[in-house]
Image: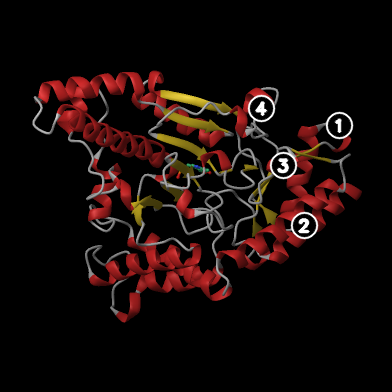
């Protein structure tokens, strides 16, 4: 029977959590802060629950340098997949709100309501567009969700990475080829594609704000690389991530939203207006303004999950005085070790994505040793497991091997895997 200390788990999510965080959480589950009641039993409306939420928000902002006067952070519950839908509903709503204001300016504030609705309907039909940059399985799913919710006429596939890589993911099309719409309700991309091992090397410059602060409304899925690298927060209108990779355990999803997209700056259109415009009405639990107004407590939130995320953040802040920059250095060091071990044996391993877009978090490769990939990968996984290196099987949709290099993987764990990669090639 292996203990936690015998195993390095490279699974892509849920991912391993730091053992000391779990030990503290186990105690909190039984008796939180000597209250005689566990953290999962306390009311989500209690003062201690509010403190846990506020501290986690503040620590996240500190670690990532999120300007809290400009951004709101909320905890939600529908996973990354829920955010595919939430981003559509909320940013289409914000687009409609802007168009509504423009129509009222054009027709006058006391214009006949039917005329206003008619003008708005025309704008929706002729101008509403959502742009998607599809670079892997998860951005593809987000794009498909937008098409499902709105209809294909409103959703623009601005780039599809498969078209430049023989029908497979593994590259990012040059930004000059992206077909971006004018005044899109959002431009969406996935910063790190967990299944395909493709990560944007940096923020795409074509989406950067202009000097006057205007520019595209950028939405990013950072589910699998949040807290692993610095990014220019102010370039985003919305970013989101599930907790279960680098932040905590499955159950909470974090959305960071520009306050200019929330009341009093932007107010979501009423259900009545959306119905008249033929646009979908968001379920209330996916409406950012509702969740933000209630400090993430519109309905029952798992405070235990927020607590774990908070403990992970406190540990990160203790470990890295230079905050995310410190973690980034370690993540790069570990990823470089693993890629170097693979590159040293091109006759045995084939790294899946193009070198220019290799993920630091999900290292995807094939084992080609002996010519029979299936057999070679089975042997690789079996021998890795016998050394305590587990969770390495690639996603079921693409196969192969995937080593997820999340923050909880210690340097020693990455060194052990690199050594095994070396040994397996030589055996
Ligand atoms: C990048 C990315 N986005 C979204 C998701 C979907 O998250 P969830 O399973 O929480 O809906 C995942 C899941 O692994 C992911 O890796």
Observer-nearest residue: 171 or 368? 171
Can you identify the residue that label 1 sits on?
371
Task: Give me the residue at 49% from left, 31% from top.
Answer: 132
Which percent across, then down, holds residue 59?
43, 68
In terms of image quadrants, where is residue 47? Answer: bottom left
Can you identify the residue that label 2 sits on?
337
Considering every residue shown, the one lying at the far right of the view is 426
Q: Nearer the viewer, mark 4 or mark 1?
A: 4
Q: Residues within 10 Å of mark 3 (few under 14, many from 20)?
A: few
Contact? badges 2 and 1 (CB < 8 Å): no
Marks 2 and 4 sit apart, C-alpha to C-alpha, by: 26 Å
Q: Residues within 10 Å of mark 4 (few under 14, many from 20)?
A: some
Contact? badges 3 and 4 (CB < 8 Å): no
Q: Is residue 267 left or right of residue 242?
A: left
Contact? badges 2 and 3 (CB < 8 Å): no
Can you identify the residue that label 4 sits on?
168
Which percent across, then down, holds residue 353?
71, 38
Q: Is residue 42 above or below residue 356?
A: below
Q: Secondary structure at mark 1?
A: helix
Q: Secondary structure at mark 2?
A: helix
Q: Residues within 10 Å of mark 1 (few under 14, many from 20)?
A: few
Can you identify the residue that label 3 sits on?
356
Q: Earlier in the sequence, mark 2 or mark 4?
A: 4
Observer-nearest residue: 254 or 116? 116
Q: Is residue 367 above or below residue 163?
A: below
Q: Nearer the viewer, mark 2 or mark 1?
A: 2
Considering every residue shown, the one lying at the far bottom of the view is 34
Contact? badges 4 and 1 (CB < 8 Å): no
């Amino acid at each position: 029977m292996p203990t936690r200390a015998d195993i390095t788990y490279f699974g892509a999510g849920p991912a391993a959590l730091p053992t000391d965080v779990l030990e503290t959480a186990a105690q909190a589950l039984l008796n939180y802060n000597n209250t005689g009641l566990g953290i999962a039993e306390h009311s989500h409306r209690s003062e201690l629950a509010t403190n846990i939420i506020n501290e986690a928000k503040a620590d996240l902002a500190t670690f990532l340098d999120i300007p809290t006067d400009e951004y709101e952070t909320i905890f939600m519950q529908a996973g990354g997949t829920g955010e595919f839908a939430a981003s559509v509903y909320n940013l289409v709503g914000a687009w409609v709100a802007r168009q509504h204001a423009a129509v009222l300016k054009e027709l006058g504030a006391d214009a006949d309501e039917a005329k206003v609705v008619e003008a708005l309907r025309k704008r929706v039909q002729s101008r509403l567009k959502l742009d998607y940059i599809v670079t892997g399985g998860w951005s593809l799913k987000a794009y498909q969700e937008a098409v499902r919710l709105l209809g294909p006429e409103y959703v623009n596939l601005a780039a599809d990475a498969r078209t430049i890589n023989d029908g497979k993911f593994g590259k990012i099309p040059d930004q000059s080829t992206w077909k971006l719409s004018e005044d899109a309700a959002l431009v969406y991309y996935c910063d790190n594609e967990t299944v395909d091992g493709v990560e944007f090397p940096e923020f795409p410059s074509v989406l950067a704000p202009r000097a006057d602060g205007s520019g595209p409304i950028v939405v990013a899925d950072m589910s699998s690389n949040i807290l692993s690298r610095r990014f220019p927060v102010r370039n985003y209108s919305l970013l989101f991530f599930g907790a279960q990779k680098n932040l905590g355990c499955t159950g909470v999803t974090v959305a960071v939203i520009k306050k200019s997209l929330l009341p009093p700056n932007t107010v979501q259109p009423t259900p009545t207006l959306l119905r008249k415009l033929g646009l979908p009405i968001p379920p209330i639990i996916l409406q950012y303004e509702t969740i933000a107004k209630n400090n993430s407590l519109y309905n029952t939130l798992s405070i235990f999950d927020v607590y774990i995320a908070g403990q992970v953040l406190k540990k990160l802040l203790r470990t890295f005085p230079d905050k995310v920059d410190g973690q980034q250095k370690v993540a790069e060091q570990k990823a470089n070790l693993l890629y170097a071990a693979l590159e040293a044996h091109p006759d045995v391993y084939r790294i899946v994505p193009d070198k220019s877009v290799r993920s630091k978090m999900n290292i995807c490769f094939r084992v080609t040793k002996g010519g029979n990939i299936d057999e070679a990968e089975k042997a690789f996984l079996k021998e890795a497991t016998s050394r305590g290196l587990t969770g390495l099987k690639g996603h079921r949709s693409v196969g192969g091997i995937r080593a997820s290099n999340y923050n909880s993987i210690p340097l020693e764990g990455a060194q052990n895997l690199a050594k095994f990669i070396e040994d397996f090639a030589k055996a």
